[in-house]
Structure formats: structure tokens, C-alpha cells
Amino acid sequence: MPLTKQLLGWYRTNGRDMPWRVKGGAHSDPYAVWISEIMLQQTTVQTVRDYFLRWMKRFPDVQTLATADISEVLLLWQGLGYYTRARKIHECAQILVQHYAGKIPADREKLLKLPGIGPYTASSICCFAFNLPETVVDGNVIRVLARLYGLTHAVTKEEIYELAKPLTPKDQGADYASAIMDLGATICTPDNPKCPLCPWRNHCVANKKNLTNQIPLLQKPQKQNRIGNLWLIRNSQGSYCIRKRLEKGLLSGLYEFPWRYDSESPLYPLSRPAFQITHTFTHFKLTLRVYCVSADTPPIPDGLFVPLAHFGDYPFSTLMRKVIHKI
Ligand code: SF4
């Protein structure tokens, strides 16, 4: 496999250093691999780095995590978004302690039965923690292989998987997966790829035919726009009303200021907003108009009044943290 050999050779000297992986085989701590893989879903490597180090310091192993209080887990996750991931990690740690003696199984089928672990994460754990020859396909891999093979149509993950499979070596699954991801992240970037530095430059169809700007062809789904109204209800001591979301659904268990969608009846008559905040979720974009209200104004809201200085004790979503930064 000359392509694989060239890529691994490039990776040995050019691969990125990350706290959750090693060059030359599997990481010695599958727990660290699992945590990093969940954090890296929907989040950049740069953002994850600090969160990962903080997390490993506080929850260094499955047992410590399993016995931690969920509110502390959410607090440490605060700002990473997609909080269901944190809840599932916690739940998964408890299952690992109960059924797997606190160890991460080196078996894709068993991994897939655990909460929060889908096909991509299961393959990544098999690769990075156990050096198994699993084929991992993410956005970077799709871009690199679509260009390498000159695919000018809108490619599917399945199609790329079939092309990636024969390139995956039997005995160096971890290095190969890291290498192709690093190539996509640092050389075969979405804009202006650095083809002269690429180990595959002489084989790459997109490079030879000058098609790098046209590949991959992406079909981005349109995000729906939603509008809501949020009230900063302040009492005479300068504390703000916050409430805990239900334990199910979007942003479950996190704290928030009272708000409603624009299509619902407002809590207070709508006046001129003090400011507005927009946040993009996976499937929609939400714009919240923010109003300031005195706690003396009826109706008296449900919730607790907390001084701004104590907000750090409560887990808030990224959206609500954007509001707090504006207060
Ligand atoms: S030669 Fe250029 S376009 Fe082709 S894989 Fe390498 S970086 Fe990407």
C-alpha cells in the first residue's frame, strides 16, 4: 500500500501532538481516548484541549467519574455545548463500573451498546485506544479522499468509507487514522490546501487537474431560524432570576433565564429589547431578544434569585453564557 506508507511516513514527522493520543500505536489509557472522542464531537481540537486537561485532572478514571455528582460533571462541561454528551458520559461510566469492572471494552459491538457511543466513536475508540484496523471517516477524511480520487459529485460517507477501507493498515490503525485526520486538518485544508507539502501530491487527481477548489462538493442543509424573548428579572439586591430546565430534552438540567419562543404568549408585555443574542444549534438558529424587568413587576416568576457573582456555581448553556457576558 504505497499510499498508506507515504502517509504514515509523513505523519511520523509532521503529525500533531495532542494530550489524548500518542504516535506509534495505541494510547495507554482507553478512558482518555473515550473522553476526548466525545468532547471532539461538534467541537474543535483547540477548544477541547483545555477542557480535556481540566476533566482528566478532576475525573482521572472511570471510577471517579461514575461516583461524581452530575451537576459537577455539567459544570466542568459548561461551554462545550451539546450537554447530552456529558450526561451520557456520566451514565456510561456507571455502566462501565457495574458491568465491565471500570474498563472500556476493546470490542466495537460492545461499545455500540453503551450510551453516547455511536458507530464513529466506537470505531475511533477501537483505533486510538486498541490500535485495531477500524476505518474512521470524518469531515477531514471525506475532503482528503474526495480530492485524492477526484470525486466532483456530492459524496456520501458510505462511498468514502469504501475508498478508505483498503488504505487502513492491519497493524497500525491508530497511526493511520491520526495521520489522515492530521493531513486534512493541516495540509488538505478546506481553503488553499498546501499541496506541495502533501505526501499524496503525485497521486492526487484534484491536484493534477487543478480541482481542489471544487472538491468536495458539499450540500449544506438550510438551518431554520427561530426567535424567542428572554427576561432578565432583577430584584432590589441585584440578583437575577434563573431556573433549572427539565431533566429531559434540549439543554436538560442546565440553568437559564426565563424565556419563551416568540410564538408563545410572553411572560411580560414586550417593549424595546436591551440587546439580542443569536446562537446556532445543530438544526436551527435561535435569536433571543433580551428584556430587563424589575422583580417587583407582576407576575412573580418561578425560579431562584442568584447574584451575578455566584453564577459560576450553576451550569449554564453556551447560549445563556452569551447572555451573561452582556449583563
Ligand atoms: S495533493 Fe492537495 S488536494 Fe490532494 S490530498 Fe494532498 S493536499 Fe489534498
Image (cartoon, rainbow, N blue to C red):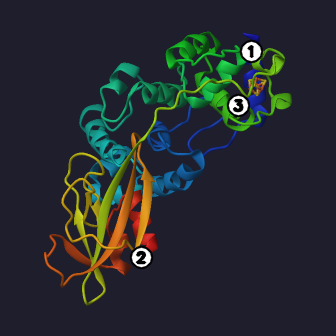
- Find residue 321 and report its image quarter: bottom left
Q: Residue at x 21, y 82 (%)?
A: 295
Q: Mark 2 belongs to which amino acid? A: Ile
The crowd level at tag 3 (other Cα within 10 Å; few <14, some 14-19, many 20+) is many
Q: Which residue is mark 3?
A: 183
Q: Give the spatial CA distance, label 3 vs label 1.
A: 13 Å
> SS for tag 3?
helix
Left or right position of 84 against 211: left
Q: Is residue 298 in sight in this rendering?
A: yes
| x and y, in percent, of residue 242 in the image | 25, 70
Q: Is residue 24 in sight in this rendering?
A: no
Q: Choose between 194 and 315: the one closer to the eye.
A: 194
Q: Choose between 62 and 78: the one closer to the eye.
A: 78
Q: Residue at x 34, y 50 (%)?
A: 65
Q: Mark 1 belongs to which amino acid? A: Leu
Q: Earlier in the sequence, mark 1 or mark 2?
A: 1
Q: Which residue is mark 1?
A: 3
Q: Mark 3 belongs to which amino acid? A: Leu
| x and y, in percent, of residue 298 in the image | 14, 78
Q: Nearer the viewer, mark 1 or mark 2?
A: 2
Q: Nearer the viewer, mark 3 or mark 2?
A: 2
Q: Earlier in the sequence, mark 3 or mark 2?
A: 3
Mark 3 lies within 8 Å of ligand 1 (Cβ measured) = yes
Q: Give the residue furthest to the right.
A: 196
